[in-house]
Image: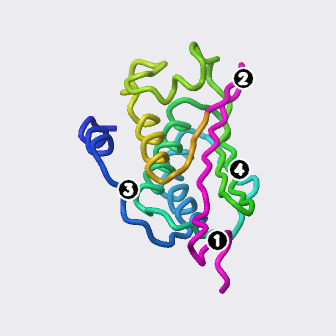
Amino acid sequence: HSFFEYAYVMNQQQTPPLKPVQVDALLTEAIAAHYAAFEQQKMHIELSTIQDNVWLVSHGESLARIFDNLLQNSLNHSAEILTISLQTSDSQCMVTFENPLLQPLQQPSEMLFERFYHEQSQSTGLGLAIVRKLTEQLGGHISATATNDSLRFELILPFDKSSSFTKTAEM
């Protein structure tokens, strides 16, 4: 992740323009874009629960960047399998990324979102800081929970109550 990208995201003063986006389609596209890299590392992606036709009033480019950075994080810091789920409730959309850790974290999991924090020297420590900032710009929340052998990211994005695009679009 480039310092330019980080600086750009951090200096955005306004919420990006929001419009209806299909979350499951963006997630599927991000997974497809990383498929070859997962294959090369002999990693498997398991789609646990993926709801179809999930729409949010959001910023598609920001959401795609969030998914991209979370997938890249798994490629860099995991082994074997990444489990992804996409579920909704009446008020929010929740996307989780869970993978085994190559080694236990050295610091509390929330430190992963701190700028320049990294547990491996080849990382810039910017990807997850960008994820947090973009998530906040979209009115959402992201958290990380670690055990000795796994790491789980939980991305929560609220549905826009003023929009007709809540939960799933009627087609």
N-term mark: 3 or 4 = 3
Q: Which amino acid does label 3 sit on?
A: Thr
Across and down, in percent, residue 59 comes to 43, 62
Q: In this view, does 90 lie above or below 162?
A: above
Q: Which of 28/87 is in front?
A: 87
Question: Helix, strand, or loop for circle 3?
Answer: loop
Which of discs 2 and 1 lies nearer the camera? The answer is 1
In contact (CB < 8 Å): disc 2 and disc 1: no
Q: Does the magenta stretch include residue 150?
A: yes
In the picture of the structure, the residue carrying the numbered disc 4 is 46
In the picture of the structure, the residue carrying the numbered disc 2 is 147
Which of discs 4 and 2 lies nearer the camera? The answer is 2
Cα separation, mark 4 vs mark 2, equals 20 Å
Q: Give the range drawn in magenta.
A: 144-171
N-term mark: 2 or 1 = 2
Give the residue displayed 62% in from the left and 49% down from the top: 156
Residue 166: give its label. 1
Q: Is residue 127 above or below residue 166?
A: above
N-term mark: 4 or 2 = 4
Q: Does the magenta stretch include residue 161?
A: yes
